[in-house]
Image (spheres, grey):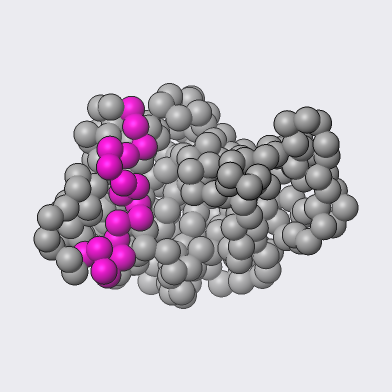
Amino acid sequence: MIKKIDIYGGTHGNEWTGMHIVKHKKFLKEDIEIFMHESNAEAFKSNKRYLDVDLNRCFSPLDLENRGEKNREQQKALEIADQIKDSDFVIDLHTTTSDMGPTLIITKKDDLILRICKKAQEYYPKIKIILEYGDPYLVSLAKRGVIIEVGPCPQGVVKDIIFDQSVLCVEAVLSAVKDHNEGHEIGELETDVFEVFERVDYPRNEKQEIAAYLHNHIEEKCFKLLKIGEPLFKTFHGEVIHNVKYEGYPIFINEAAYYEKGVAFVLTRKRKA
């Protein structure tokens, strides 16, 4: 039984949709306690992704075991870790500048999480399911949880369709949890899932500066098969760089926040689950 659910928004302070959902929306499901949390309110007030470091990369065991001197996000991570110890399920709300639509990201191998996401997809068929195991995100601390990621949305704004899609994702997940609690068989049918296996950087020069940007051919093609020979990058002098080695289904294409992380797009494999 999943009796207590914690919903976090504003883990990245310039992703306003999640913050305004937890500030202004109420979700009610019979026999489930639902609590709303502002993850990084100080970064939100400054309209910055983070103040010192990326909060959503501060949840590794090493980060949490070391309780010495901490910067602001590291201290917040400790507070969140203590907060969700008794939570049965965590939802973390995010937006992306990439054209991904509504997605659910699963960060650990767990049959029940997958079945909940598959049932949520039945409630809201536009949802795509991403498997991204191993990274120390906020939801990785929870017994179970899922990241909701919706785009495209610029940083520091609220967009009507993105807000509504995010709310629909939350409602779909909550409905799936309710079905599970009532003893219904959920998530039995196979669906397509997209499993992350590689992060691809931009071409760089000898100074490690970006030497090319993503070609228009790949823009707005999240979850579409990337083939050998297709245009991939274009240099600042107009030379087209064709794809010679990457095959898969890209996501997070040209995500603004990933420039600092050296990621032009994330590559996934599509399979049935």
Q: Position of residue 131 (x, y in %)?
A: 53, 64
Query: Residue reaching furthest front?
Result: 206
Q: Which residues are magenta?
A: 47-64
Question: In this view of the protein, can residue 172 be seen by the observer?
Answer: yes
Question: In this view of the protein, can residue 76 be seen by the observer?
Answer: no
Nearest to the observer: residue 201 or residue 73: 201
Nearest to the observer: residue 7 or residue 97: 97
Residue at the spot 42% in from the left edge and 64% down from the top edge: 135
In the drawing, does residue 15 fall left or right of residue 19?
A: right
Residue at the spot 87% in from the left edge and 53% down from the top edge: 229
Nearest to the observer: residue 173 or residue 18: 18
Quadrant of res 90: bottom left
Residue at the spot 13% in from the left edge and 63% down from the top edge: 67
In the drawing, does residue 222 fall left or right of residue 207?
A: right
**Main structural element of the magenta stretch: helix, strand or loop?**
loop
Q: Position of residue 163 (x, y in %)?
A: 45, 32
Nearest to the observer: residue 6 or residue 258: 258
Asked if the stretch drawn in magenta spans residue 157, the answer is no
Q: How many marks?
A: 0
Query: Residue reaching furthest left?
Result: 68
In the drawing, does residue 261 fall left or right of residue 2?
A: right
The quadrant of the picture occupied by the N terminus is bottom left
Q: Position of residue 253 (x, y in %)?
A: 63, 44
> Does 1 appear above or below 19?
below
Residue at the spot 40% in from the left edge and 35% down from the top edge: 15
The quadrant of the picture occupied by the C terminus is bottom right
Q: Position of residue 130 (x, y in %)?
A: 55, 59
